[in-house]
Amino acid sequence: MTHASTQLFPVILPVSDADQRLHGRDKVKALSRLARTALMTSCEKSGLYLDAFPKNEKRVPIPVGGVYWSLTHKSDMVGGVASLLPVGMDLETIRPVNDALLAKVADDSEWQLVDGDRQRAFFRFWTAKEAVLKAVGKGMVGLSRCRVVAIADDARMTLTYEETRWPVAHFWLGGHVAALTTHHLDVFWTPPRR
């Protein structure tokens, strides 16, 4: 028996080689379809039900029957999660970024929390902030109000958005990192299988 009120089941799925070769709208449709499959698998694992995926005029997911949901996709991986609490999930491919982007995602006080590789930390910060902004229904315009305030370890950190604390879990998979707002719930990641 699953406990949707105490557990989260984020699901990450690989994108097929054929879908990775698609371009434009065809690729967007394929990634969206697969991300919804990940979301439906999350629903099944958590005992939740979604029969629609409505979004508001800003393209922010709207809860359905008390079920919140979040999708994320990259060209080779997608993810989805359902929850009884506002939830956000993001996935990024780790790659080199320039100093200007490092400065854009975090200020000096946030960077002081980092011991080690700022390139790797950048993707933790970026995905965590995007996950929180998805959970609160804001786009990247809210980035400056979203701040990293504590780093527990390589898989957990805490952010604030307008004085509300948001615990975030990270999951590392190859050259990718995923972030999920957790509300301190138990998280059971379903990683991709090729």
Image (tube, rainbow, N blue to C red):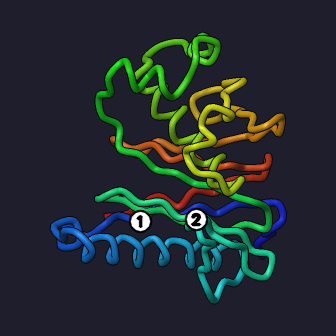
Q: Quadrant of residue 156?
A: top right
Q: Residue at x 75, y 34 (%)?
A: 160
**What is the x, y in percent for residue 131?**
60, 48
Considering the numbered disc 2 on the image, is that residue within a helix, a strand or a loop?
loop
Q: Say which quarter of the image contains residue 164.
A: top right
Tag 2 residue: 58
**Picture quarter with the C terminus:** bottom left
Return the disc, 2 or 1, that comes first in the chain's sequence. Answer: 1
What residue is rendered at 41% in x and 60% in y? 73
Q: Quick check: 176 left or right of 155?
A: left
Label 1 sits on a secondary structure element that is strand
Q: Position of residue 18 (x, y in %)?
A: 18, 73
7 vs 115, left or right, is right
Q: What is the three-letter code of the residue carrying label 1?
A: Leu
Mark carried by residue 13: 1
Residue at 36% over, 59% down: 77
